[in-house]
Amino acid sequence: MTEDIEKVNTTAEEPVVDEQIEAVPESDAVATEQLADQPTVPATVENTEDLNSTEVAVAPTEQTDEPLVTTDEESVEETAPKYTNYETTTDIIARLKAIAESDDEVSRQEVDALKSNFYRIHKQQAEAAYKAYIDGGGDPESYTPALSEDEQQFKDQMEQVRLRRAAQHEAEERQKEENYTRKLAIIDRIKQILATPDDVNKYYNDFKALQQEWNEIKAVPAEKATDLWKTYQQNVEQFYDTLKLNNEFRAYDFKKNLELKTALCERAEQLADETDVVQAFRKLQQLHQQFRETGPVERDLREQIWTRFKAASTLINKRHQDHFEARKQQEQENLDRKTALCEQVEGFDLDSLRTFADWNALSEKIIALQQEWKTIGFAPQKQNAQIFERFRAACDAFFTRKSEHFRSVRDNLTQNLQLKEELVKKAEELKGSTEWKKTTDAIIALQKQWREIGAVPKKFSDDVWHRFNAACDAFFEAKKAANGTVHAEQQENLQKKQAIIDSLAAIDPETTETDFRPQLRQAQEDWNSIGHVPFKQKETLYQAFRAQMDRLYGALSQSATRRRIERFRSEVKDTDGHIRERLVRQFDILKNEIKTYENNLGFLSLSSKSKSGNALVEELNRKVDKLRADLEEIRLKIAALDEKEEK
């Protein structure tokens, strides 16, 4: 009888920890099964991507009679083995398909690892394809990644896995309801035993069997767990309180349990030195499970051993909570930085980009921002996917616009090439022409059109330009050779016209007694009969000829004016007021007319830059000079009248 009793693992009068909390997907609430005297502690939940499990970090409490256990599926995830033995996307897709079709429980860690491996391999394949394209001489700006059929298959299989995980979750919830019903039945059976206190001893083995059955039944609905556990614990404690065991068994059992729980306290205290916070927390969960399964100790030591174990648990829980709070803060900072990058990319004014340099400069900025993005860690799980999609959408919008712009530019370059090839064809047809003037004008017009046409594809640019330039040069070289004799003739004409200028310069109006007007008329006729001179000397030579003619005609004009004044003096015998008034009126009229011409000359000098405009200015200057000479003659006549009146 004693041997049988020593094998019994009792839980009477001992606080029991909550049931192991199983992870549930998405946003399902998670609670712990607690003692009747322990208040419910709120949990903080964070979602993970894909097959999410709930992270639960329960704050430690002081008013409790049971070890405080918190679970965190993400901590398990961080220490889970890595599934990295896949080298092709085909193998990964096949494994996902097998998971979707299997009846086994879906491992979120494996699915996450498969997803990570798939996109790692997918990225390597994309980079290899791009490198092969560049090594093959492809244009980086024209590169368009090929569509990936594997990626769509991968997403389809991931969706099937998600659906299967949801189905598993529904099955788990149904199982929890069944477990709840079974545990209620166990409590009812214990109550039936307690209804006859005198017969408790003979139902001891039945009671232990019920406890074993209770422990074998796993999770129940979270919202019912606390009340269920309180009811169960109250009935268990009542059973042990009414159970009349011999003192020897109870003392031995309590001593044995004290040793076990003391060892668990020591192991929990050693976890404070564990550098891996998550690993320490995970080990603590295992210790809590063992503490709960260990039977009670003496009532006087019960509070003491629990306080010691709770103190060690509180320390580990605090470190674990601080760890995830720090990570949560870091993830929020990462989200803020990534949001700033999104706003920066979205804020670029794509409509202002005109040239290749503008697009390429902005491309470099966005690529730099993408590199910066890679250096930033994860954002909070709820926003991580959204912020990435936002950043990728902004980058995709830019590169799509850039691709469209470059495609448009390429089309324009191709059209420009066709236009320039047509000009080349025309120039090559004209290069053999000997109609120098007409063909020169035609080729100059072609050159003007060439400058107005935009750029052509770079690989054709040099060839089409050399062809066009060669055709133009061929014509002008031929024209230059043909005009060699013309140049000699123009040099001879230059010497003849220079001789006319020299002969006019030799005439001195003061010493020449004969009338040299016939000589001036002959010089004008000879000048007009001589052909063209070199273009560069044409204007200078004409100005020199015009200066000599103006000098001599001016001298003749002054001489004639003097003769007219003398004749006026001799013809006007007496002073005549009417004559003077008429002269004064003529003087004023000429003076106003000169002023008008001078104003017109001012406007023409500012606005006219053509040859015809310059000729008009010269003609007006000659008219002004003539009017000034007439004005001076009238002034001298008025002075002559005034002299006669004084005499």
Image (cartoon, rainbow, N blue to C red):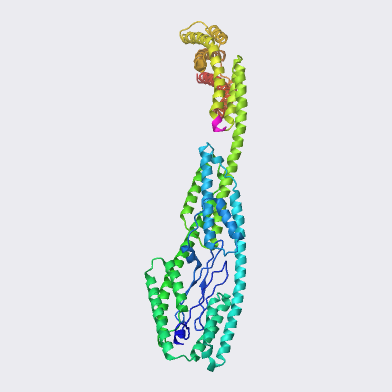
* Residue, far bottom: 198
Left or right: residue 247 compared with residue 124? left
Left or right: residue 341 compared with residue 314? right
Q: Nearer the viewer, residue 148 or 407?
A: 148
Residue 170 picture location, percent across and down: 62, 69
Q: Is residue 513 magenta?
A: no
Q: Nearer the viewer, residue 293 or 324?
A: 293
Residue at left 56%, top 69%?
24
Residue 334 picture location, percent across and down: 48, 59
Residue 626 picture location, percent across and down: 55, 19
Q: Which residues are magenta?
A: 455-460
Say whether residue 380 is visible. yes
Q: Nearer the viewer, residue 115 or 443?
A: 115
On screen, residue 395 above or below 254: above
On screen, residue 60 above or below 602: below
Marks counted in the figure total 0
Residue at left 57%, top 8%?
529
Q: Nearer the viewer, residue 542 or 88?
A: 88
Locate residue 187: give its quadrant: bottom right
Q: Is residue 459 magenta?
A: yes
Say whether residue 586 is visible. no
On screen, residue 344 above or below 175: above
Left or right: residue 260 compared with residue 239? left
Residue 178 picture location, percent across and down: 61, 76
